[in-house]
């Protein structure tokens, strides 16, 4: 067997890191952040606790990485051509894709919404979260201003709060929440 190339080592490291994050997401979601430990995550991931620390310095860093990566994935969908201008088609696409993400990544959003209710944990990534959300706010404020909405800031804050509320209700009660109907209504009223 020939020695591995740096690119192969990089892929192995990337895959292991992703596996650790997926396992941690499960553990945090099932047990809550406070009740989860690096030992629990390492055991479930099938690696040593020491190896965990090669990838993440702490439980806090691991959680923060999971949350910020998950939210980045969502907000990356907002301006697909990265021109800084939100069109009606792009906004519709964003809403449709966010609803798909909420459905496909329910475990992540369950964790995210439960963390919102824990101020001491939320503070771990609150500042970075604001950096991620800021472009969303700016581009939606500009969008609503161009549409002639009386108060674009309030409209942007409202749709942001609606995303949170819709996601929360769907994640914790999916059988009772008509996600597709809500999505259509949201697009009709806010795009």
Image (cartoon, rainbow, N blue to C red):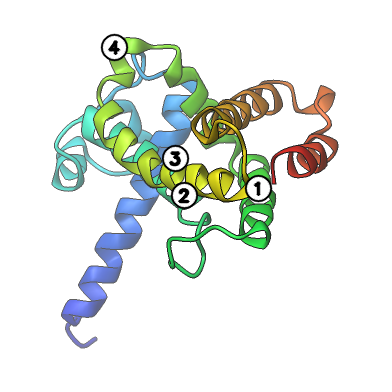
In this rendering, position of residue 100 left or right of residue 161 = right
Q: Secondary structure at mark 1?
A: helix
Marked residue nearer the N-terminal end (4 or 1): 1
Ranked by sequence position, the earlier of labels 2 and 4 is 4
Measured Cα–Cα span from mark 2 to mark 1: 14 Å
Asked if disc 2 and disc 3 are in contact, CB closer than 8 Å, the reply is yes
Which dot marks residue 120?
4
Which disc, if any, is residue 139? Answer: 2
Q: Residue at x 43, y 66 (%)?
A: 82
N-terminal of the pair, mark 4 or mark 3, is 4
Of the residues tagged 4 and 1, which is closer to the observer?
Answer: 1
Residue 42 visible to the viewer: no
Residue on which disc 1 sits: 95
Whole-number angstrom distance, CA of label 4 to CA of label 3: 25 Å
Mark 1 neighbour density, 10 Å: few (under 14) some (14–19) many (20 or more): many
Quarter location, residue 66: top left
Name above or below for residue 102 compared with residue 139. above
> Who's the residue at 18% across and 82% down the image?
5
């Amino acid at each position: 067997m020939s020695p591995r190339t740096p690119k192969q080592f990089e892929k192995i490291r990337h895959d292991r890191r992703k596996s650790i994050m997926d396992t941690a997401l499960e553990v945090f979601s099932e047990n809550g952040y406070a009740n989860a430990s690096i030992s629990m995550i390492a055991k479930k991931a099938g690696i040593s606790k020491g190896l965990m620390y090669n990838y993440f310095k702490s439980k806090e860093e691991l959680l923060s990485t999971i949350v910020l990566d998950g939210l980045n994935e969502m907000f990356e969908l907002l301006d697909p051509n990265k021109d800084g201008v939100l069109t009606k088609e792009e906004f519709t696409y964003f809403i449709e894709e966010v609803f798909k993400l909420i459905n496909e990544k329910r475990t992540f959003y369950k964790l995210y919404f439960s963390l919102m209710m824990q101020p001491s944990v939320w503070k771990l990534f609150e500042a970075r979260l604001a950096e991620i959300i800021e472009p969303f706010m700016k581009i939606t404020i500009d969008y609503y201003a161009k549409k002639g909405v009386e108060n674009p800031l309030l409209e942007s804050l409202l749709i942001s709060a609606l995303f949170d509320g819709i996601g929360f209700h769907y994640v914790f009660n999916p059988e009772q929440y008509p996600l597709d109907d809500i999505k259509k209504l949201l697009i009709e009223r806010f795009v």
